[in-house]
Image (cartoon, helix red, strand yellow):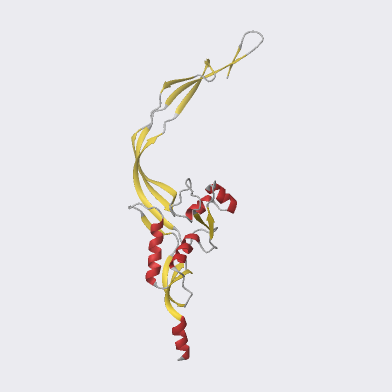
């Protein structure tokens, strides 16, 4: 009875978030764990057509935990965003740029953007607090979507050299015209950053027209007599 009383007093039902089979985050119940994972999928910018999933194998397991062992929800949010490293807060000072901060703490600039969703690298504010961590986020949110866009096809330039024209002289015989195509891409982003763009289909509406150019090949060199013409 004493042992049972002790277990009831110091143990409680909780929920563990498992990442690739490893227990990473302990929360008070399954509902809170599901809320956390749902929140994580909403952190990064998404399109209504995005298909969201986790890159890692993420599971929720019901476990018994000791009182005080579970994490506060806000701390758990930082944990999944910043990894297991110690979280360091940095306060932006006058004149700081994200590049300067990244170099000073020896962290990739992309990593700082990963761990600070919604950060505008070009518009840091004085006294703005940044979270710095040298580990990748604990869980990676992968967003994929298909998008169809109209694009220009760059035209080629065919250059011929004429030894009757001075070097630097350029004559466009016929102007190039870009082609047009409709392309369907599968775009993949991890934690808000695009990492891949696969062409699924393309329809060429019009072929590009090559630009024909003639360039000079003569250099005039000063001499004691008359100028000398050098052809290249």
x, y (%) of residue 15? 42, 73
Q: Is residue 153 above or below residue 105?
A: above
x, y (%) of residue 221? 62, 15
x, y (%) of residue 94? 54, 48
x, y (%) of residue 189? 42, 52
Residue at (47, 55) in percent of width and height? 116
Residue at (41, 57) in percent of width and height? 43
The answer to whether residue 38 is left or right of residue 122 is left
Front residue (pair 13, 157): 13
The answer to whether residue 151 is left or right of residue 65 is left
Front residue (pair 143, 8): 8
Residue at (54, 51) in percent of width and height? 108
For residue 184, what is the image quadrant? top left
Q: Is residue 155 above or below residue 120?
A: above
Q: Is residue 192 above or below residue 166?
A: below
The answer to whether residue 108 is left or right of residue 59 is right
Quadrant including the C terminus: top right
- In the image as oriented, which residue stretches furthest toward the bottom? 1
- In the image as oriented, which residue stretches furthest toward the top? 225
């Amino acid at each position: 009875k004493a042992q049972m009383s002790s277990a009831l007093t110091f143990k409680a039902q909780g929920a563990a978030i498992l990442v690739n089979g490893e227990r990473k985050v302990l929360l008070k119940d399954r509902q809170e764990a599901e809320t956390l994972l749902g929140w994580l999928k909403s952190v990064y910018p998404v399109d209504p057509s995005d298909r969201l999933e986790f890159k890692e194998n993420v599971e929720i397991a019901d476990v018994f935990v000791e009182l005080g062992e579970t994490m506060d929800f806000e701390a758990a949010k930082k944990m999944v965003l910043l990894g297991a490293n110690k979280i360091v807060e940095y306060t932006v000072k006058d004149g700081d740029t994200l590049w300067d901060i990244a170099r000073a703490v020896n962290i990739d600039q992309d990593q700082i953007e990963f761990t600070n969703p919604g950060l505008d690298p070009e518009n840091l504010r004085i006294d703005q607090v940044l979270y710095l961590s040298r580990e990748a986020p604990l869980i990676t949110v992968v967003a994929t979507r298909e998008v169809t866009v109209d694009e220009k096809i760059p035209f080629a330039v065919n250059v011929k050299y004429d030894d009757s024209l001075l070097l630097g002289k350029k004559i466009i015989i016929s102007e190039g015209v870009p082609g047009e195509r409709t392309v369907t891409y599968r775009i993949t982003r991890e934690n808000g950053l695009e990492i891949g763009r696969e062409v699924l289909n393309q329809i060429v509406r019009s072929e590009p027209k090559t630009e024909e150019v003639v360039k000079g090949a003569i250099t005039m060199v000063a001499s004691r007599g008359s100028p000398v013409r050098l052809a290249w």
